Image (cartoon, rainbow, N blue to C red):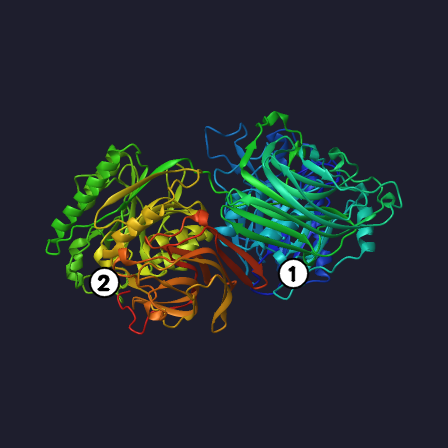
Amino acid sequence: MKCLSGLFPIFFVTFWAKTVLTEYTAAVVEYYPDPNKQLAPEEKVRKNIDGYLKILDEIEKKHKLDIIVFPEATLTITAFVETKIDISPYTFEISDSSDSLCTTQETTSLTRLACAAQKLKTYMVINLYERARCKSTSECSKIGWDFYNTNIVLDRNGSVISKYRKFNLFGEYLMNRTKTADIAIFETDFGEKFATFTCFDILFKQPALDLIRKHQITNIVYPTMWFSQLPFYTSLQTQFQWAYAVNATGGTGIYQGTKGPLVYDIFGTAQSKAFVATVSQKSRAQARESTKNIDKKAKEMDHFYFQPNDATLFTSKPIKFGEQEINDTVCSEGFCCNFLVSLQWNAATTKNYYVYHMVAFNGILSFAGAYNGGIELCGVIACMTENLDSCSKRFPNYDEVSWPATIRRIRIKAQFDIDDNKFQFPNSLLSNIKPLPVEDFDWTNRTLSTTIERTYTLKTPQNRLMTFGIFGRDFSRDSPISPVEENSYTLTITLILILIASIIYAKAVVTEYTAAVIEYYPDQNKLLEPEERLRRNVDGYLKIFDEIQRGQLKPDIVVFPESTLTANAVIRNRTEEFPYTVEITNSTASLCTAENSTFLTRLACAAQRSKTYMVINLSERARCQSPSKCSEDGWDFYNSNIALDRNGSVISKYRKYNLFGEYLMNQTQTADISIFDTDFGATFAMFTCFDILFKEPTLNLIYKHRVNNIIFPSMWFSELPFLTAVQTQQQWAYAVNATVLAAGANNPKVGSGGTGIYQGTKGPLVFDIEYAQSKAFVATLSHQQSSVRRETTNDIDKKAKQMDGFYLKTDNLKPYTSRTVQFGEKEINENVCHEDFCCNFKMLLDWNKATTDHYYVYHLTAYKGVRSFSGVYDGGVDICGVVACRTQNLSSCGKRFPNYENISWPLTFKHIQIKAQFEIDDKKFQYPNSLRSNIKPLPVADIEWTSTTLNNTIERTYTLKEPQNRLMTFAIYGRDFSRDKYPSRRRNAI
């Protein structure tokens, strides 16, 4: 598989459209350019434009187009160019003018295409070689021009409305590369928004994956010149697996994600063709092909050139002729694939038939000698012999091939690390060099602690199978091999692209860094003047900060908690709030300055002196910009986080969006997206306290903006049985698999406390709840496993006793449906339902004698409805849980016995499994929730959290793997954001 050049070139335009807003008609063109290498540049371009226009005229006779896309490099390919001087006559200068290119002034070869777009009233995407005046005196070539492989988009008037310069060049040594990837997005008058990128770009995060995940574009225009390679990287096979895996709509073809292709094909002979389809929600995939049609197309492919692939690196077990049932595991470098294969055999009618190999590979493959890529794959592949060197080859004459094996079923399973540098695809191929129909396979996954188990199942018998595999990419192992000098370029564009069309979200590998999160117990004197209160609490911050600096671990970043600079102040109105507020300008200058000094000055100087990033929560004031909504004093007040860099300068600011009461604070109209980069390689985002229970900005930061390091200052008021502080922090970090630096305010009298550093599904590095004291929690973050020591029962009891004086709010479980665990019950398998929402509980129990009168009664609970968050907000929840209650009455659930020493624990939970189904809806999210008597969650090694997709629902399974005898809560905690609302007395300080 290659981009640009080679024998029998096929020029692909792939068009993906996932979210179809309206019905529209699209055409993608497979184009065979003029093969005459002797033509002068102007003549070559003219002839290929003639070819483009001929296709347009043919389409016009049958269809009214909304958009047409032409492939990569086909205006100029087959030209012989060795230097920039050679390529210059094939290039176009594209100005920033919004005027139509259909003009008699300054006409170029593009004029005819622009006039055709104007005449047909269609959008048009064209790939070309662009020239632009070099702006860099130090890096300019002798001729003073930069050259780019560029896509331009014309609107219905023939005007350029978007331009994209290919970012990931591969072998195009005469082309320049932009410093950062262009984000080329354009809107249409038929209601769709598109983005465009080119060929090799599809293997990278920038711009391709960023367009999908960060910019939320699901309609992709993709010109390419693709070269096919067996057994995994033929064109349609590659395009199909990518579109299916990311569920977007994109050989030449138009795909609709998991619905499959609307139109697609590949040709064994040199020809041009337009593929036209109407794209809508009602569009149907291309019809299933009969065996006769498969064979007809496969015969046409006898003359098609396939790039060879080195399969000798794979680990293999051949399937012997006549074997009917196989259950075997094949491993490569610690990576194992399990195969279940069922076959039926007939006699071979010719000597040429394929031998199937079960293969595994975990390593690095070279892509045409120009690039190395990390690969993890499992597959059943067709080879000419039992030797692996025959596995990327076809028999030369399809008519002489027989097919004695019918593969009735295949199931392949493999586990992959949960890592944003890794992604897997369902990969298949029939003998006609097309993938299987989507209805013939299942592609499922299951999360197992730190791994994801992929299962790829063949559901419909196949007797023309060439490939059926899980193809995984590991971007962390990618590397270029060596640069090629410009003077070695001779259309060595033969070196381009030998890998799958897979886009993986590959987050930058973060280097090791040290973080400190502060649990702070603020000054308790309620009678202090504002200036004195701020001074004392800044003193307290600096005392802790200096202690950290004297320790063994020097932090790169320090996070302070929410509201602890102003805590315990009596603030009843805006006048009393004002002295605690500070104005934060947009200046990039350090706050460590004698001019305009505030209480922040000393903190900024400490950050500067220690060369440490610092995050501080404060009360911010800003001049009101809305005359109709301004308060009388003309100020807006915000609960804000600011991030200082190592120089003490403000580099990021976040204003809390989901306010918990806080009636003197303003709420921004939309949630701030506060993201900042660091010099140690990590990108962070911030949100505050109550935000963690909502979609915006929290979940959007993870899934839309792809930030995986979160800073979380809070003053959390812990609530039993589901929402105590570190319980909430860990459930969120685990569910989204993110690193969370959580700093908590400490005040046991009101239930505040709880701080930690979490590494997603690896669990906490450090975490605890302190009792009326301040403490710094410091840890070095790397790719190593969690370092928290497993606590003994004595440790749990000691901490639990300390929590007797810690105020804990309780949720109201009276509306829940409940089934009580009866003393002495050994085994339970039961459904508990609330309205139409059901939870299945499977439990194994072991009982001892109760040594005191006080022991907890456990309830199996289910609830689907709306709950109040302390009267300030109502939120939708879907909950299944095992919770500890003081009696058989639900009103006692979430209440601790007052004296921990008087409690006995007769029940040991040997095993719990909770299952429930939830609608697949971006307004719903579920978390694994647990709590022991020490008001800390279970170790992540003791739980398993998996999911299975079932049509339009997701089945969550939460399993207790290790026996527990101090359990307070074990639950699936689901949020339904669609039911959120303010209570009847709506907050009026927005």
What is the three-letter code of the residue carrying label 1? Leu
Q: Residues within 10 Å of mark 1 (few under 14, many from 20)?
A: many
Q: Residue at x 73, y 34 (%)?
A: 388
How far apart are labels 2 and 1 at the CA level?
56 Å
Q: Residue at x 50, y 68 (%)?
A: 831
Residue for badge 2: 664
Residue 11, picture quadrant? top right
Which of the two residues, 398 or 720, is positioned nearer the viewer here? 720
Left or right for 66, reference 660: right
> Does residue 298 appear in this view?
yes
Which of the two residues, 339 or 92, is positioned nearer the viewer here? 339
Q: Quadrant of the C terminus?
A: bottom left
Mark 2 / mark 1, whichever is N-terminal:
1
Q: Residue at x 58, y 29 (%)?
A: 481
In the picture, the disc for residue 561 is none
Q: What is the residue that sits farthest to the right in this orientation? A: 349
Q: Secondary structure at mark 1?
A: loop
> Does residue 704 appear in this view?
no
x, y (%) of residue 663? 24, 64
Left or right for 83, reference 722: right
x, y (%) of residue 114? 61, 52
x, y (%) of residue 486? 59, 27
**Is residue 72 depicted above or below 751 in this figure?**
above
Q: Residues within 10 Å of mark 2 (few under 14, many from 20)?
A: some
x, y (%) of residue 675? 38, 47
What is the three-letter code of the residue carrying label 2? Leu
Q: Secondary structure at mark 2?
A: loop
Which marked residue is nearer to the observer: mark 2 or mark 1? 2
In the picture, the disc for residue 65 is 1
